[in-house]
């Protein structure tokens, strides 16, 4: 008997002693194997993470900072800037250390969704107030600028026109992506169709801006249907890639069809818009002559500004009214659940095509405005990057949110332009520093950062189109993104 | 006939390059169901790293060509794989499980960032590299003066593609990593419940795709001899077309699709017009997606309610 017990204790599995010790500790009330996280380990861990990050940055950038290629006489030469490389490694180390130690170090609080619900009604009012204020600023901007910043007047007005163009394009694309849930990466095609239709009509048939504008919109809408028809069956990413392909096809055709579009040389001498036949130029029969004002080139900019403001507001107005029409309701229903739509007898073909056509029409309007503002267009202006910027504005602002598009346009387009003027940074990075070079680099990075920070866009609430009893906003998470995902 | 044969050889070479890039797309799409828009840029970065390594080796006096090519290949694969891993970690992993448009936008943002990063650090001008591997085997010497030739570099590209394809097929079908990848592709949640480290598997998928794209980038550099920071976009879209044509998620499909796109593009430029070769590739993409969404070798997608 005694033998068996002793052999049993000898045959005890490994760690059994430890287990019994743990049990004893537990009886005494001490938690097994739990060490309190001390400051020391946190420091060590942060240092470790920082070292790994620095090593990674070193590997990633060694062939771009430390060594790089340059074109020299008779081929390529190797240049490089090892000190720049080391500087970046140091920056990565310090940044990661600070992040690890102070930001990621603590335990992450769990974030509940209840705050959003509580603040929803307040946000609705806030959104309205912001909208009204923005509208007032937009209407009075030329006067504000000429009063307060007369020296920068022309430049800022030009920037405002650019931002409004993107706002309008964003609102146009929002119909397709935000409301109908059809992911379109080739929106620039319709922008190009609008610009080229106006330019060709105006230069070949001697027509003015106001006659061509609706025609350009019609052409673009027609192209929206033509390109929309084959992709009706596609969903999600596939739809995105095919629309991208269509956008590129249109650009390549514009680039190579010399006798019709002028190829890479583009179209020159596109007429400027007139106000009821009054031109914005010097001399007899001009705007300044008719109203007895002194001629100034800024008048034309103010006029262009009000045209694009009116066009953009038209887009917004039509979108808002469309949401209340059966077809608009059908767009949103399609975004939420396509199969349910079909079962309930909605003709998804028509609904999708109207979304494509409406979105394309506004793209066409924006395109003809672009053509008349520039006076010159070429396929260069209609690359994929343009589509990506417009889609980024819509998604970053918050899919389906009209105010979000405005905010994202101001932040992204205005931010890029602001960067152009940051010559003060030369003091930090040396005289050779050219901020304009880094424009798109920072744009790309900003897209990543904003999306990671707020995947649902900057405006995180949406207003439902159908309401029961009282008007409320809902969280963006409650809105589907379409295409059956 | 001779002209046709020559075009066939050129098409197969181009198709091999597209096929290698397409594998990256198809693996990532298979496993997390997103288009990795930055993959074309990874290919571009791979070719830039290869070029820089080449110049650096020349500067320290290593000119023995096989060694140079081997070193270029290894360094480019490692560094580009690090880029692939970093991009996944920064731009895609935080958004996993978030709504599906978000990673698409970060991918586009990453693509813009990488293009401009290379433009800023390596310059915007086209980089020419004189041909390093010259000569080849003359297959046919007709009296009409058209010579059918397969050059050494074409042989290297095709051979390397075959080797890499075989190796990766074996990894996917035989190793535990490949099993984990296939498990994640079928059902990510179930795989994680069964003890597969999903994050690690996805990261490794990106690393593998990036390494293959680096090989493609290096071969592109050696074959064409000119690169710039913009080559990634068009190559990326065409490789994606190849992946879709072959059936997304399928490795042999990606290779087959790559060959098909390479041949179509070469024959289109050879017999019709060079200007519209991109239109041909894009039209194929649209036609395939519309009429045959599951591709040549893919499984049809079942719509579940």
Image: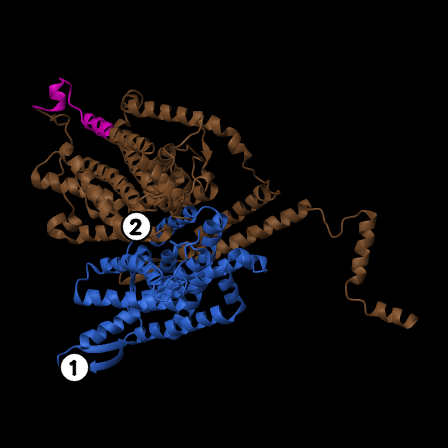
Chain colours: A brown, B blue
Return the residue nearer the eye: A161 or A151: A161
Q: Residue furthest top?
A: A292
Q: Which mark is residue B142?
A: 1
Q: Residue furthest right?
A: A2
The quarter in which the N terminus of chain B is drawn is bottom left
Residue B66: image location, x then y, percent: 38, 74
Is A65 left or right of B193, judged from the image as shown?
A: left
Is label 1 in a helix, a strand or a loop?
loop
Return the residue nearer the eye: A25 or B38: A25
Report the number of numbered marks: 2
Is A140 left or right of B209, judged from the image as shown?
A: left
- The quadrant holding residue B17 is bottom left
Residue A243: image location, x then y, percent: 29, 50
Residue B62 seen in the figure: no
Magenta stretch: residue A364 in it? Answer: no
Density class for disc 2 (Cα within 10 Å; few <14, some 14-19, many ≥20) is some
The range drawn in magenta is A284-307
Density class for disc 1 (Cα within 10 Å; few <14, some 14-19, many ≥20) is few
Return the residue nearer the eye: A347 or B39: A347
Residue A3: image location, x then y, percent: 90, 72
- The quadrant holding residue A280 is top left
The residue tagged 2 is A232
Q: Chain of mark 2?
A: A
Magenta stretch: residue A294 in it? Answer: yes
Residue B157: image location, x then y, percent: 34, 72
Residue A390 seen in the figure: yes
Question: In the displayed structure, would residue B142 be above or below residue A103?
Answer: below
Q: CA distance from mark 1 to mark 2?
A: 51 Å
């Amino acid at each position: 008997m005694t033998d068996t017990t002793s052999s049993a204790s000898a045959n005890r599995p490994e760690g059994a002693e430890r287990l019994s010790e743990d049990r004893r500790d537990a009886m005494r009330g001490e938690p097994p194997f739990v060490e309190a996280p001390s400051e020391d380990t946190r420091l060590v861990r942060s240092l470790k993470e920082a070292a790994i990050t620095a090593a990674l940055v070193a590997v990633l950038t060694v062939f771009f900072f430390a060594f790089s290629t340059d074109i020299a006489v008779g081929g390529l030469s190797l240049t490089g800037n090892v000190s720049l490389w080391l500087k970046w490694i140091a920056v990565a180390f310090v940044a990661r250390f600070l992040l690890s130690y102070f930001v990621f170090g603590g335990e992450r609080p769990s974030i509940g969704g209840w705050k959003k619900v509580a603040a929803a009604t307040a946000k609705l009012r806030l959104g309205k107030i912001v909208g009204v204020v923005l509208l007032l600023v937009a209407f009075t901007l030329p006067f504000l600028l000429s009063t307060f910043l007369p020296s920068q007047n022309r430049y800022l007005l030009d920037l405002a026109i650019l931002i409004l163009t993107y706002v309008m394009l964003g609102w146009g694309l929002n119909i397709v992506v935000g409301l109908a849930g059809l992911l379109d990466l080739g929106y620039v095609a319709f922008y190009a169709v609008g610009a080229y239709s106006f330019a060709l009509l105006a230069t070949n048939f001697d027509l003015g801006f106001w006659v061509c504008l609706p025609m350009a919109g019609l052409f673009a809408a027609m192209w929206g249907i033509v390109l929309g028809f084959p992709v009706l069956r596609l969903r999600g990413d596939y739809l995105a890639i095919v629309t991208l392909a269509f956008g590129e096809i249109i650009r390549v055709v514009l680039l190579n069809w010399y006798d019709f579009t002028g190829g890479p040389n583009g179209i020159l001498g596109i007429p400027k818009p007139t106000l009821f036949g009054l031109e914005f130029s010097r001399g007899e029969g001009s705007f300044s002559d008719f109203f007895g004002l002194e001629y100034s080139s800024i008048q034309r900019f103010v006029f262009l500004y009000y045209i694009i403001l009116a066009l953009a507001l038209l887009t917004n107005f039509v979108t808002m009214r469309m949401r209340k029409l059966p077809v608009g309701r059908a767009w949103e229903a399609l975004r939420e659940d396509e199969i349910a739509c079909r079962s309930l007898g909605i003709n998804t073909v028509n609904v999708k095509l109207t979304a494509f056509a409406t979105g394309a029409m506004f793209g066409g309007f924006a395109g003809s405005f672009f053509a008349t503002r520039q006076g010159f267009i070429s396929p260069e202006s209609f690359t994929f990057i343009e589509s990506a910027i417009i889609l980024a504005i819509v998604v970053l602002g918050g899919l389906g949110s009209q105010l979000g598009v405005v905010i994202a346009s101001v932040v992204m387009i205005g931010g890029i332009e602001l960067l152009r003027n940051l010559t003060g940074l030369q003091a930090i990075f040396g005289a050779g520093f050219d901020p304009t070079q880094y424009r798109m680099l920072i744009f790309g990075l900003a897209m990543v950062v904003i999306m990671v920070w707020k995947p649902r866009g900057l405006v995180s609430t949406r207003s439902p189109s159908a309401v029961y009893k009282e008007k409320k906003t809902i969280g963006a998470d409650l809105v589907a993104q379409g295409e059956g995902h | 006939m001779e002209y046709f044969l020559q075009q066939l050889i050129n098409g197969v070479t181009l198709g091999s390059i597209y096929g290698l890039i397409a594998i990256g797309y198809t693996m990532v799409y298979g496993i997390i169901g997103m288009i990795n828009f930055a993959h074309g840029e990874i290919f571009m970065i791979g070719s830039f790293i290869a070029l820089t390594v080449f110049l650096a080796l020349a500067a320290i006096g290593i000119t023995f060509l096989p060694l140079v090519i081997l070193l270029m290949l290894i360094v480019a694969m490692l560094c580009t794989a690090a880029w692939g891993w970093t991009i996944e970690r920064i731009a895609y992993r935080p958004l996993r499980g978030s709504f599906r448009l978000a990673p698409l936008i970060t991918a586009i943002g990453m693509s813009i960032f990488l293009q401009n990063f290379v433009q800023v650090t390596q310059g915007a001008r086209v980089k020419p590299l004189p041909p390093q591997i010259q000569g080849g085997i003359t297959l046919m010497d007709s009296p009409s003066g058209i010579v059918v030739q397969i050059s050494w570099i074409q042989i290297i590209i095709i051979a390397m593609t075959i080797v890499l394809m075989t190796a990766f097929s074996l990894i996917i079908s035989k190793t535990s990593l490949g099993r984990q990848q296939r498990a994640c592709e079928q059902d990510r949640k179930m795989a994680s419940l069964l003890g597969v480290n999903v994050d690690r598997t996805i990261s490794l998928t990106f690393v593998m795709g990036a390494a293959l794209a680096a090989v493609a980038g290096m071969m592109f550099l050696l074959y064409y001899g000119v690169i710039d920071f913009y080559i990634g976009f068009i190559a990326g879209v065409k490789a994606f077309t190849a992946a879709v044509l072959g059936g997304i998620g399928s490795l042999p499909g990606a290779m087959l699709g790559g060959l098909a796109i390479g041949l179509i593009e070469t024959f289109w430029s050879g017999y019709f017009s060079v200007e519209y070769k991109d239109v041909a590739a894009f039209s194929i993409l649209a036609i395939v997606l519309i009429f045959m969404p599951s591709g040549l070798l893919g499984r049809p997608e079942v719509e579940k309610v």
